[in-house]
Amino acid sequence: MTLTDRRAGAAPPRLVTPRPPAGRTRSRARSATVRALGPVALLALWWVASATGLLTPDVLASPPQVVDAIVELWGNGQLSQALAASLTRSGLGLALGLVTGLTLGITTGFTRLGDELLDSSLQTLRTIPFLSLVPLFMVWFGINETAKILLIAVATTFPMYVSTSSGVRTTDPKLVEAMRSFGMSRLGIVREVVVPGALPSLLAGLRLSMTLSVIALIAAEEINATAGIGYLMTQAQSYARTDILAVCILVYGLLGLLADAVVRLLERVLMPWRRAVPGGTR
């Protein structure tokens, strides 16, 4: 209100009682339906393009041909064997990378000496693309499983390291000092205070590492693999089987989707308070 309005005797504006925004609840079925719209639309577009001849089989097989290829590969056992080999490589490399990244992240984030000794070197190594290490790993470890697993481990170590180190550094120092004053050991502080406080960062690092484990798996299986999804792709490429190539690509995509779903489930179990978001739309 201006000074002129006050002199003219204008009524003051009415105050409105603030109300919190009403939460909108969404059922799980509706949420799943909305999430499925994108993939279903892509599948429909692919089907129409194949049916109208815009996509020929020598470019990309049609969805029915891909389904037939899945039935064929699963029936003769090739798909199940390839999945077992790829999941074993990815799982071992991911586990090794997570343990290494978690250990290094806690060391550099919790101790000044560890930070001064290790962080600069690890940050330098982090900038090296892991794909550039493929020829070097072949020279060092040959073309056996060791090179493949270690390549996945290297790719997954640094996302976990960065997230862990950042999360540990944000731990409340007053809380750490309070635990020390009560006589808690360093290992106990890390287990009871530091790791729970850094949990959101740890899960973010886990999500990045699991995604990179699938990407690194694709690169690792190019190292003269004799089993796995990558080997199946190489064989399909030799015979121009675009249906099998599409199956392998879909499998890699589903593995990445499964990894993301696992992290989402862990977030729900370990951090149930994060389910509530503004507006209640989750």
Image (tube, rainbow, N blue to C red):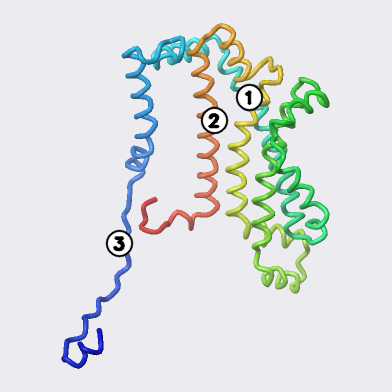
Disc 1 is placed on an element classified as helix
Image quadrant where one finds the N terminus: bottom left
Tell me, yes or no, whether the two marked residues, 1 and 3, touch with CB atoms within 8 Å. no
Disc 3 is placed on an element classified as loop
Q: Answer with mark 1 or mark 2, whichever residue precedes in sequence.
A: 1
* Mark 2 residue type: Leu
Dividing the picture into quarters, in which one does residue 87 lie? top right
Residue occupied by mark 3: 22
113 vs 82, left or right, is: right
Q: Residue furthest bottom?
A: 7
Q: Answer with mark 1 or mark 3, whichever residue precedes in sequence.
A: 3
Residue at figure coordinates x 71%, y 43% from the top left: 126
Residue 139 or 145: which is nearer the viewer?
A: 139
Residue occupied by mark 1: 86
Residue occupied by mark 2: 255
Residue at figure coordinates x 71%, y 45% from the top left: 101
Tell me, yes or no, whether the two marked residues, 1 and 2, touch with CB atoms within 8 Å. yes
Q: Answer with mark 3 or mark 2, whichever residue precedes in sequence.
A: 3
From the viewer's perspective, is residue 96 above or below residue 137? below
Residue 272 location (% of width, % of height): 49, 54
123 vs 84, left or right, is: right
39 vs 211, left or right, is: left
